[in-house]
């Protein structure tokens, strides 16, 4: 069955439904035993290629955060077609994702799971990844991000890092280990365009997550 066989969910409809789910989750609390209401016919969310991973991911993902309703929201999003889930060492949502995957192990092969940490050098990536896997209680993640890349480095350090031999070797070790299929970074840096250009030149990074504020426009309509 392809995307044309079933109706696609639009962004506005998903967000409106999600708002209702969030309110319900806050009322009911974060008990993992609460089953999320499943739609009569599971919607299909369109997919797009992610970076140079070669993987098509749903155009909507669930960026998890500390919330009393996280357990329920995870199940709700999955029931409504979301297959990309995002967490980090600082989000406080890894335990909820771990509970979900333990309760529904079949889900792991169906989702694209990304997590993040804050290394100060490439060699810190491997032990940090091990800690993230332990927190998530899974053997692998699909994508491991360096989070807020450039915040703890000077611009020159960040540029040199993504083109360095050390980073290339560490990334290759991670991929070969199977603990993370892909390696990338998220960035909010004011000069992120220069860091992204350097990453393209280095050829090591598989995907990049950018800060983006939809409501902000610097140019007139």
Image (spheres, rainbow, N blue to C red):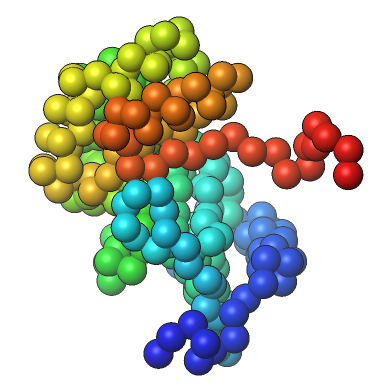
Quarter that holds the C terminus? top right
Instruction: Say which residue appears at 79% left-offset and 42% top-offset.
Output: 215
Instruction: Say which residue appears at 34% left-offset and 60% top-offset.
Output: 55
Any part of residue 98 in sight: no
Instruction: Say which residue appears at 39% left-offset and 43% top-offset.
Output: 207
Q: Residue 50 at what x, y percent from top left?
A: 41, 53
Q: Residue 153 at what x, y percent from top left?
A: 43, 11
Residue 117 location, quadrant: top left
Q: Residue 218 at what x, y percent from top left?
A: 80, 32
Q: Residue 193 at what x, y percent from top left?
A: 53, 26
Q: Where 196 sits versus 30, above or below?
A: above
Any part of residue 164 in sight: yes
Quarter that holds the N terminus? bottom left
Q: Residue furthest right?
A: 220
Residue 212 location, quadrant: top right
How many marks the image carries: the answer is 0
Q: Where 175 sits versus 155, above or below?
A: below
Between residues 4 and 63, which one lies in front from this camera angle?
Answer: 4
Between residues 58 and 200, which one lies in front from this camera angle?
Answer: 200
Q: Where 40 sits versus 142, above or below?
A: below
Q: Is residue 7 left or right of residue 166?
A: right
Between residues 161 and 188, which one lies in front from this camera angle?
Answer: 161
């Amino acid at each position: 069955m392809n995307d044309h066989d079933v109706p696609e969910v639009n962004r506005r409809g998903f967000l409106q439904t999600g708002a209702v789910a969030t309110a319900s989750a806050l009322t009911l609390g974060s008990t993992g035993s609460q089953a999320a209401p499943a739609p009569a016919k599971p919607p299909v969310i369109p997919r797009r290629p992610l970076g140079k991973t070669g993987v098509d991911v749903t155009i909507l993902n669930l960026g998890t955060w500390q919330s009393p309703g996280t357990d329920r929201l995870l199940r709700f999003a999955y029931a409504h077609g979301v297959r990309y889930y995002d967490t980090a060492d600082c989000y406080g949502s890894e335990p909820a994702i771990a509970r979900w995957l333990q309760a529904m192990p079949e889900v792991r092969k169906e989702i694209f799971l990304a997590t993040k940490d804050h290394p100060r050098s490439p060699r810190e990536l491997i032990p940090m990844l091990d800690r993230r896997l332990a927190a998530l209680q899974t053997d692998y993640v699909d994508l491991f991000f360096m989070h807020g890349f450039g915040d703890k480095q000077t611009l020159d350090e960040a540029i040199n890092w993504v083109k360095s031999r050390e980073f290339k070797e560490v990334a290759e070790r991670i991929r070969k280990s199977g603990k993370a299929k892909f390696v990338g970074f998220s960035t909010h840096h004011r000069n992120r365009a220069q860091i992204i250009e350097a990453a393209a030149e280095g050829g090591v990074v598989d995907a990049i997550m950018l800060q983006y504020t939809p409501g902000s426009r610097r140019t007139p309509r």
